[in-house]
Image (cartoon, rainbow, N blue to C red):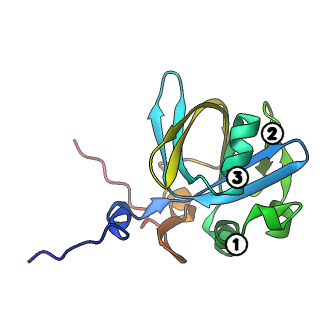
């Protein structure tokens, strides 16, 4: 009736999850990476958490700069999302440009944003929590914005948000909005 789930496989019980692009910059170095282990943790103040492996270049830049952006790319950019999730920023002067995405200045932080995004969160680092092979980066959101057409209650918007299943596999929500009385 039940099958054993390995400790390597267990996180995928909690998938699919929205995939975001975490971007950070310190001095003249910048990087961006795909991350699906992201979650809101507080409304007031607005706080988000993202789990990042300590060996990732983006993690290093976040720790040094004390800031990052979260960029929600639409599923039309899955090839670019996959690229950002599988190559190291240490190998590129500008990993965002290497992914054929458009980098721009954020409104309130020096870390970049990605113009193809549906929505963007600008964050300052509040905490870095040791958690095993990943650390929990806790950021206070100091600016949040989305495209005018972005509406999470709109089925077309929902269908554009890529969900990470595992490895190089993605899906999208069916888009059906179900309201429970």
Q: Which residue is mark 1?
A: 83
Check disc 1: other Cα within 10 Å, few if <14, some if 14-19, many if 20+.
some
Compared with 25, 72 (above or below) is below
Look at discs 3 and 2 and give the one toward the viewer.
3
Using the numbered discs, state the Cα–Cα distance from disc 3 to disc 2 in whole angstroms.
Answer: 17 Å
Q: Which residue is mark 3?
A: 58
The C terminus sits in image quarter: top left
* Image location (x, y in percent) of residue 50: 53, 46
Quick check: 158 left or right of 20?
left
> 51 or 60, which is in the foreground?
60
Q: Residue at x 86, y 64 (%)?
A: 97
> 32 or 72, which is in the foreground?
32
* Image location (x, y in percent) of residue 44: 49, 21
Q: Which is nearer the N-term, disc 3 or disc 2?
A: 3
Residue reaching furthest to the top: 44
SS for callout 1: helix
Residue 177 visible in this rendered orientation of the protein:
yes
Compared with 166, 123 (above or below) is above
Q: Tags 2 and 1 in contact by the CB under 8 Å rule?
A: no
Q: Residue at x 35, y 60 (%)?
A: 14
Quick check: 25 left or right of 19?
right
Q: Which residue is mark 2?
A: 106
SS for callout 3: helix
The N terminus sits in image quarter: bottom left
């Amino acid at each position: 009736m039940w099958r054993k789930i390995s400790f390597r496989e267990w996180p995928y019980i909690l998938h699919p999850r929205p995939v975001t692009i975490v971007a950070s910059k310190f001095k003249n170095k910048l990087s961006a990476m795909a991350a699906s282990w992201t979650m809101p943790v507080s409304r007031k103040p607005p706080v988000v958490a993202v789990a990042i492996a300590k060996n990732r270049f983006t993690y290093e830049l976040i720790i040094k700069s004390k800031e990052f952006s979260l960029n929600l790319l639409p599923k039309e950019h899955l090839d670019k999302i996959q690229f950002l999730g599988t190559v190291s920023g240490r190998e590129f002067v500008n990993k965002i440009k290497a992914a054929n995405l458009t980098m721009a200045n954020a409104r309130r932080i020096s870390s970049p944003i990605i113009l193809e995004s549906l929505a963007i969160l600008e964050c300052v680092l509040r905490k870095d929590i040791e958690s095993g092979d990943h650390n929990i980066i806790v950021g206070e959101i100091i600016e949040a914005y989305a495209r005018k057409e972005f509406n999470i209650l709109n089925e077309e918007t929902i269908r554009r948000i890529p969900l990470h299943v595992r490895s190089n596999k993605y899906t999208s929500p069916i888009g059906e909005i179900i309201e429970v009385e």
